[in-house]
Amino acid sequence: MSSDTGIWEFRSTSGHISGTDLVGYHVEATDGHLGKVDRLSEEVGARYLVVDTGPWILGRLVLLPAGVVLRVDEDERKVHVDRTKDEIKHGPEFDPFQLEADLGYQEKYAGYYGPFYGGPVM
């Protein structure tokens, strides 16, 4: 998966169908429950989930590029991601104001998540 665009697109094997509203779905990391999908972007080249982590990291919202989604289980309303809770916790801090202001946030997330998928370290 290329860090340039790959992390910003759902994997073809994830089972996600474009247009399916994932808001409210439970998110499962490789080591347990992470939270619930709060927002979803379906913008081409900038697909991501914003997850409300609840109390385990003080109610923090985290942004997860769509490429971390391993699979979507519509029957159970769950999104499974291929990162641990700790990896996600130590990822870039989500700033909704920066997200709305410019696309510079993509570099920050590509720099963190890209190396997990063989992308360059930024």
Image: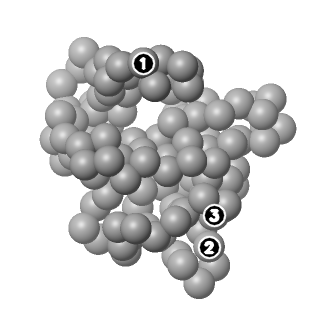
Q: Residues within 10 Å of mark 1 (few under 14, many from 20)?
A: few
Residue denoted by label 2: 77
**Going from the N terminus, do you reach mark 1 or mark 3 first?**
3
**Going from the N terminus, do you reach mark 3 or mark 2 first?**
3
Q: Where is residue 93 in the image (x, y as percent from the top left)?
A: 55, 20
**Can residue 40 be seen at all in this image of the molecule?**
yes
Question: Looking at numbered disc 2 in the image, what kind of residue is underneath it?
Answer: Arg
Q: How crowded is mark 3: few (under 14 residues within 10 Å), some or many (20 or more)?
A: some
Report the mark closest to the observer, 2 or 1. Answer: 1
Report the mark closest to the observer, 1 or 3. Answer: 1
At numbered mark 1, what does the secondary structure look like: helix, strand or loop? helix
Q: In this view, does 86 lie to the left or right of 83?
A: right
Question: Rounded to the nearest whole Å, what is the CA distance between mark 2 and mark 1?
Answer: 31 Å
Q: Are marks 2 and 1 in contact (CB under 8 Å)?
A: no
Q: Which of 89 and 95 is in front in this view?
A: 95
Residue denoted by label 1: 101
Question: Rounded to the nearest whole Å, what is the CA distance between mark 3 and mark 2?
Answer: 5 Å
Report the residue at 67% width, 61% height from top. Answer: 24
**Can residue 14 be seen at all in this image of the molecule?**
no
Report the residue at 51% width, 36% height from top. Answer: 63
Q: Is residue 33 above or below residue 113?
A: below
Question: Rounded to the nearest whole Å, what is the CA distance between mark 1 and mark 3?
Answer: 27 Å
Q: Where is residue 43 in the image (x, y as percent from the top left)?
A: 32, 47
Q: Do the residues labelled 3 and 2 touch (CB within 8 Å)?
A: yes
Report the residue at 37% width, 27% height from top. Answer: 109
Quadrant in the rendering for residue 33: bottom right
Report the residue at 35% width, 67% height from top. Answer: 18
Q: Which mark is residue 25?
A: 3
